[in-house]
Amino acid sequence: MSNKKDENNKEMIIPEHHSAVRHIINEANGKPNDMFVESFLQAQNTVGTYVIMEGDWGGQIYLSCPMNIVKCNEDTLKNLLIDLDIIAWDCNEGEGTGLYYEVREPGEGIGGGMGGGEIKEELWIHKELSDLNLYEEIENVLSGAKEKIK
């Protein structure tokens, strides 16, 4: 759990399976934090769940995709996050990454830095990763066709 202070210096406890950025945004806007799904297995069994990967402590959303298109195992998913973080934020030395499962609707935005992200009916990746021509590589890992990008 992450411990943060709110505007009244009251300690806020943020569960590990919550993106701190989106948790705080929800709190600030009076929205419930019931969108977060606790585990990979629960995400596989919860309709409308999306995988969201972020780096730089929420400073960049790397990707989002519906959980129903994820055919790789959880370890492969975690390794994909590590690989994307090395590409985008190598200077953070592996710190500040997040792999989250959230119940979302296509068309919603994802709060985060560098423009945030998007919820679509298919894979969405950040423009920086798209500019590196990584869409198909990432898609192949998520589908289970490959274990790693490149």
Image: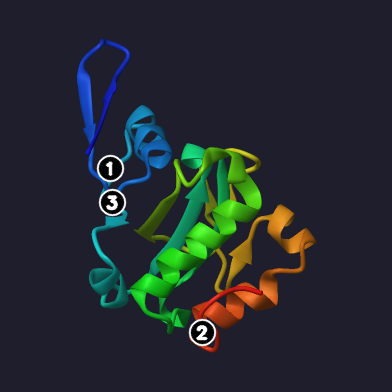
Q: Quadrant of residue 118?
A: bottom right
Residue 118 appearing in the image: no
Disc 2, SS: loop
Residue pictured at 66% horizontal, 56% vertical = 126
Identify the amino acid type marked 2.
Ser
The foreground one among 141 and 106 is: 141
First reached walking from the N terminus: tag 3 or tag 1: 3
Q: Which residue is mark 1?
A: 32
Label 3 neighbour load within 10 Å: few <14, some 14-19, many 20+: some
Q: Which residue is mark 3?
A: 17
Label 2 neighbour load within 10 Å: few <14, some 14-19, many 20+: some
> Which of label 3 and label 1 is nearer to you?
3
Image location of residue 47, percent across then percent down: 32, 74
Residue pictured at 35% horizontal, 39% vertical = 23
The foreground one among 88 and 126 is: 88
Residue 46 against residue 2 in the figure, above or below: below
